[in-house]
Image (cartoon, helix red, strand yellow):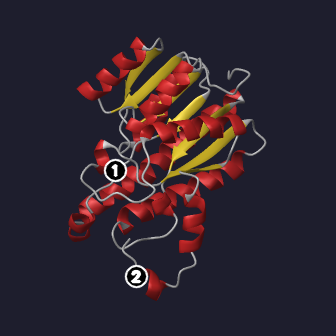
Amino acid sequence: MKDAFGTPQSLLILGGTSEIALATARRLIARRTRTVWLAGRPSPDLERAAAHLRGLGAETHTVAFDALAPDSHETILGKIFAEGDIDMVLVAFGMLGDQAHDERDPVAAVRVAQTNYTGAVSAGLVCARALQAQGHGSLVVLSSVAAERARRSNFIYGSAKAGLDAFTQGLGDALHGTGVHVMVVRPGFVRTSMTAGRPETSLATTPEAVATAIELGLRRRSETVWVPGALRLVMAALRHVPRPLFRRLPL
């Protein structure tokens, strides 16, 4: 169960090597989170992440999980929930892809879409049902400002995130009143290994800043979190820019 300050005692991360997710885990462990499950593809990076969190004092487990294998999600995630209540699930897996390459390779484009959208739909529904059965918990999903409006430079990734964003909002409405809290997190450009070498925006942020915003959102039981907060206004304006003008913007 969460403590008096809303800090989860147990945390399940789907995408266990995500830099944003691990920054969130570190912050929550410092606030009293004691058990962490890192679900992801088996790798030295996953084991190093687990060892790091154990060093911070959290009982940490790794679980083999593949976003692109939805047939396995119910079994794998069901075993985790069978070990005890999970106070927070953070859906943090995803891939940016290479827009120029993926436009020429439909199979690669579909992989981006499946990783960012259909994998999260499958895992999200499994976790939502488990959280509802236990009667409490938060489901936090990492979306992106790219979900707000398709841009020429990354419309494959953006369209998948748009689907994920809409799915998560609808899931939150479906779970309203059940004791399960659903929160969408929309970061802008985050400085991580996934974005290394790409041009930064003026509102670029860090995994630690996103983690801080997630913790605050949990305490407030927010439904939507923007990181940084100024992006809410920026995207509100961009949504209404006429398409002929929008095409000319360097986005």
Using the rendered view, name the quadrant where residue 193 is placed.
top left
Residue found at x 37% / y 58%: 113
Mark-to-mark CA distance, 2 and 1: 24 Å
251 with respect to 184 (left or right): left
Q: Quadrant of the C terminus?
A: bottom left
Residue located farthest toward the bottom when viewing the structure as drawn: 244
User: In front: 75, or 142?
Assistant: 142
- Front position in the image: 166 or 45: 45
Q: Is residue 142 visible?
A: yes
Q: Is residue 227 left or right of residue 117?
A: right
Which residue bears the numbered disc 2? 247
The image shows residue 38 at horizontal and vertical percentages of 42, 26
**Which residue is drawn at the image coordinates 38% and 61% (left, top)?**
157
Q: Please state the horizontal and vertical placement of residue 197, each as a whole percent of the image.
A: 24, 53
Q: Residue at x 57, y 55 (%)?
A: 167
What amino acid type should be assigned to the residue bearing mark 1?
Met
Q: Is residue 222 above or below residue 218?
A: below
Which residue position holds label 1? 95
- Dot 2 falls on a residue whose secondary structure is loop
Q: What amino acid does circle 2 point to?
A: Arg
Q: Position of residue 75 (x, y in %)?
A: 46, 30
